[in-house]
Structure formats: C-alpha cells, structure tokens
Amino acid sequence: MELQSHDPVVTDPHLYRVVFENERVRVLEYRDRPGDRTGSHRHPDSVMVTLSAFRRRVSSGGREADVDLPAHEVRWLAAQEHAGHNTGATDTHTLFIELKELSPAAPPTADALGPSPR
C-alpha cells in the first residue's frame, strides 16, 4: 500500500492507531493536542471524518495549507505526503478510511495538500 517508513502509524505511533483493517481498507484513528506535530507521512486516497473541530497546518515540499474544520465533517483526502501541526486551541480527533485499491483515474497531482473542500 505505501512505504513502511512513511506510514503514519510508524512515523507517529503516539498519534495514529489502526482501528480496523481488511484487504480493501484501513481505518486510522488520529488524536492530538494543541501544539502537537506529526513527522512527514503519506496517506493513500482516503475519506476523513472529523470527530472534533480542529485547526492545523499541513506542509509538504515548502508549501503550507491551513485547515480549519468543524466536527462531524466528511471530506475526501487525495493521496498525499505531508506533515501536520495542531495550531488550534482544541484536541483533534479524526478517522481516516484509507483505500487500498488504486484509483482508476490518473495519479494524484502534486497540488494535493490537506482535505478537499466540500
């Protein structure tokens, strides 16, 4: 699915944990506190479900994007590599439903950073 060294469960085991996995999907739970940072890691195409409101900055290759989402949002996250920083005043609680099957569409562009707008 992805390089082991960029797997968020490996790069940040104190923040990510696998809550479900089968041959088609892997579901990760992510929790952090204000000020927490992740190392650079990779997500395949995923669906992100926000269980809490949060504010964070994601960065990759010198680019940054500020993300501010309310609780109970469902967003598409195109395959990407990034690092994150909780820049808000609240804890983050999110689920990522990672797809293991490759997209039949063209490969993701380098422009993907953070979740897509609704």
Image (cartoon, rainbow, N blue to C red):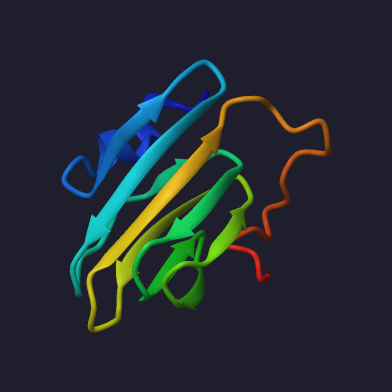
Q: Nearer the viewer, residue 84 or 26?
A: 26
Image position of 100 with respect to 45: above or below: above
Side of 69 relative to 28 (left or right) = right
Q: Position of residue 1 (x, y in %)?
A: 52, 23
Q: Position of residue 61 (x, y in %)?
A: 51, 59
Quadrant showing the C terminus = bottom right
Which residue is at 41% across, 72% downward? 71
Image position of 66 with respect to 108: above or below: below
Image position of 36 with respect to 70: above or below: above
Question: Which residue is at the far right?
Answer: 105
Q: Position of residue 41 (x, y in %)?
A: 40, 45
Which residue is at 67% across, 53% downward? 110
Q: Nearer the viewer, residue 61 or 19?
A: 19
Question: Which residue is at the far front?
Answer: 72
Side of 18 relative to 42 (left or right) = left
Side of 44 relative to 3 (left or right) = right
Residue 114 visible in rendering:
no
Question: Which residue is at the far top?
Answer: 23
Which residue is at 68% across, 60% downward? 111
Q: Position of residue 13 (x, y in %)?
A: 20, 40
In this figure, what is the number of numbered marks?
0
- Corner quadrant of residue 101: top right
Side of 44 relative to 57 (left or right) = right
- Corner quadrant of residue 85: bottom left
Residue 60 visible in rendering:
yes
